[in-house]
Image (cartoon, grey):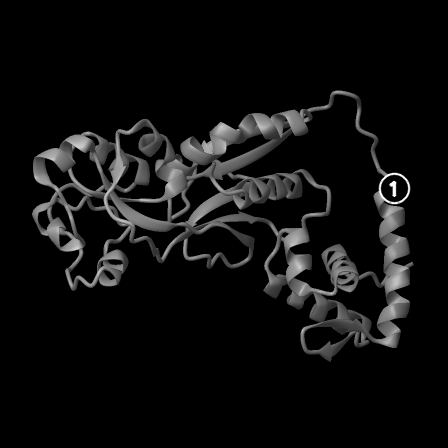
Amino acid sequence: MTYRVPPLQCLTAFEAVARLRSGTLAAQELCVTPSAISHRIRQLEDVMGIELFNSVQGGFTLTARGSEYLEVVKEALNALSHYSARPRSAGEIRQLRVAAPPTFARQVLVPHLTGFQDAHPDIELILQLSVPLVGLKSENADIEIRFGTGSYPGLETVKILDEPVFPVCSPSYLRDVGPFQSPEKLSTARLLRCPLEPWRPWLVAAGLDWPEPSIGAQFVDLGLMLEAAVNGQGVALARNRMARSWISSGVLVPLFDLQVRSIYAYYITYPPGCEEGSDIVKFVRWMTDILRNPLK
């Protein structure tokens, strides 16, 4: 017998949108983008040959056929969620490979790992480092945290951290080369270079039509650049979570109140079609919840 069954991710998207009456809320619940939700609804309508929702400004309302189909989908999802094809043995450990850029891994991921391990003792995390922007890593990962523009074709992509940048330096550098009472005074400072954190957006916001710095070593890692700043080598651009440990310990000090959004942010990516309740979805939800909370 041939079954005409739509993809499971389309069914879960449909049920979530119908229940929450919002594509944005459904996307947050399923840890995907709103555009992915829209794509799944359209795919489901194409497969079934029916219109599921009425176009109503500010929300979603089910069509008559959509309401009928929702009851079928809810019953099917409920049946599937209460049956396991292979019961897991007590204490069974499953591995989950997570790749992340070095500074994110050290400053954000590792400090919170205990919380995930306590909540999911049956999941063994294998952490590996990746190269920011390029995304190179030593082995295939189930989940990858990426630093870049957010364009990762073929993967589910969720923005998890988009912090503004601001200049920092060590107290000794501020004493020896400063004070920097205004952004213009940075003309006497060495602006540390990192292709991951270009200076132009901040300079423009500060009213300075200066080119990107062209003197000194380049650091292809945010943590290395911040370490250079800690060692009195110049002024670096920092983000709150990435520089939190250095700033809280006093080895780096912010110079100005001006904070500017960068062209890059952190995203979490994973293969499409992950089922609700899978280890990947559990990790994605945990990570997004951690970063949704403000720094204390």
Outermost residue toward the top?
A: 91
Residue 10: give x, y in percent of width and height.
73, 61
Horizontal side, residue 242 vs residue 66: left or right:
left
For residue 21, say whether it is visible: yes
Residue 16: give x, y in percent of width and height.
75, 58
Viewer-closest of 104 and 99? 104
Residue 92: give x, y in percent of width and height.
73, 23
Helix, strand or loop under label 1: loop
The amino acid at mark 1 is His
Residue linked to disc 1: 82
Horizontal side, residue 290 vs residue 246: left or right:
right
Viewer-closest of 190 and 88? 190
Image-quadrant location for residue 20: bottom right
Q: Which residue is found at the position 73% from the left and 42% from the top?
A: 277
For residue 196, say whether it is visible: no
Viewer-closest of 236 and 13? 236
Q: Which residue is found at the position 20% from the left and 33% from the top?
A: 170
Q: Which residue is found at the position 16% from the left and 64% from the top?
A: 209
